């Protein structure tokens, strides 16, 4: 074998080695990109704040009732690298499992890595609550416990190419102080 053949063989082997290293490096970069960037997470929906605009309560044992006008701030936190476009929905407030009012969450879009804030006004009344419930004792104690539930159905759009359906749900407990007419505890799961 001549010196020229050995040198050309070494150059050829080195070239194949560089090509193989480049392919392996590209595969690792694509794999890391898919693992960390393309992972689609479910957005989080929460009640950020609830303000009581008006409240009237009757705690008499014969006919207990309440009528509340509240202004709730619903937040949709999107942790994805693409925007979350969701359809319109309802947030339902209930007392001991009985729906007492609902508000409309408008169709919107939460941008990538941002939180979308939506104001919802809800009128609540106790017309559907049975008279044999604990409503009279709750109103006379000054603590009205309500639960809020909503489900947002939408799609996460990544790079305008990938669209993945995701449903986010809101499940919160609101404790209204009927004497001070304020919300004193707001917890979300």
Image (cartoon, rainbow, N blue to C red):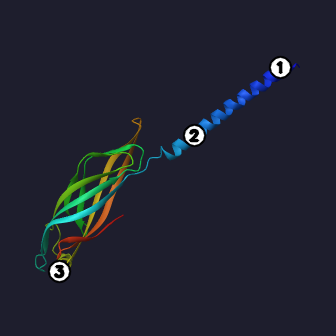
Q: Say which residue label 3 marks.
A: 140
Give residue 120's quadrant in the image.
Answer: bottom left
- Residue 15 at x, y = what percent? 71, 27
User: In the rendered image, is residue 166 in sight?
Assistant: yes
Give residue 94's quadrant in the image.
Answer: bottom left
Residue occupying the far right of the picture: 1
Q: Residues within 10 Å of mark 3 (few under 14, many from 20)?
A: some
Q: Say which residue label 1 marks.
A: 5
Give residue 103's quadrant in the image.
Answer: bottom left
- Residue at the spot x=36%, y=43% of the render? 83
Left/right placement of residue 136 relative to residue 117 reads left
Q: Earlier in the sequence, mark 3 or mark 2?
A: 2
Is residue 13 placed above or below 82 in the rendered structure? above
Q: What is the C-alpha distance between the residues marked 1 and 2?
A: 36 Å
Closer-to-camera residue (16/63)? 16
Left/right placement of residue 149 relative to residue 66 reads right
- Residue 141 at x, y = what percent? 20, 81
Is residue 107 placed above or below 95 in the rendered structure? above
Is residue 22 placed above or below 185 in the rendered structure? above
Q: Say which residue label 2 marks.
A: 29
Q: Residues within 10 Å of mark 1 (few under 14, many from 20)?
A: few
Q: What is the C-alpha distance between the residues marked 3 and 2?
A: 64 Å
Could you say whether the residue bearing mark 1 is in a helix, strand or loop? helix
Q: What is the C-alpha distance between the residues marked 3 and 1?
A: 100 Å
Of the 4 image quadrants, the one containing the N terminus is top right
Could you say whether the residue bearing mark 2 is in a helix, strand or loop? helix
Q: Earlier in the sequence, mark 1 or mark 2?
A: 1
Left/right placement of residue 39 relative to residue 83 reads right
């Amino acid at each position: 074998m001549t010196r020229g053949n050995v040198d050309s063989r070494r150059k050829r082997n080195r070239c194949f080695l560089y090509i193989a290293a480049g392919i392996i490096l590209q595969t690792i970069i694509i794999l890391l990109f898919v693992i960390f960037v393309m992972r689609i997470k479910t957005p989080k929906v929460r009640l950020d704040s609830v303000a009581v605009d008006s409240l009237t309560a009757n705690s008499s044992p014969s006919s207990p009732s309440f009528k509340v006008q509240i202004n709730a701030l619903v937040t949709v936190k999107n942790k994805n690298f693409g925007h979350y476009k969701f359809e319109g929905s309802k947030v339902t407030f209930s007392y001991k499992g009985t729906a007492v009012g609902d508000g409309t969450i408008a169709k919107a879009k939460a941008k990538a890595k941002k939180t979308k804030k939506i104001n919802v006004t809800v009128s609540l009344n106790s017309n559907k609550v049975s008279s044999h419930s604990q409503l009279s004792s709750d109103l006379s104690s000054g603590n009205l416990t309500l639960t809020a539930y909503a489900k947002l159905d939408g799609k996460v759009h990544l790079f305008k190419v990938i669209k993945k359906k995701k449903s986010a749900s809101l499940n919160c407990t609101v404790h209204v102080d009927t004497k001070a007419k304020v919300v004193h505890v707001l917890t979300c799961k």
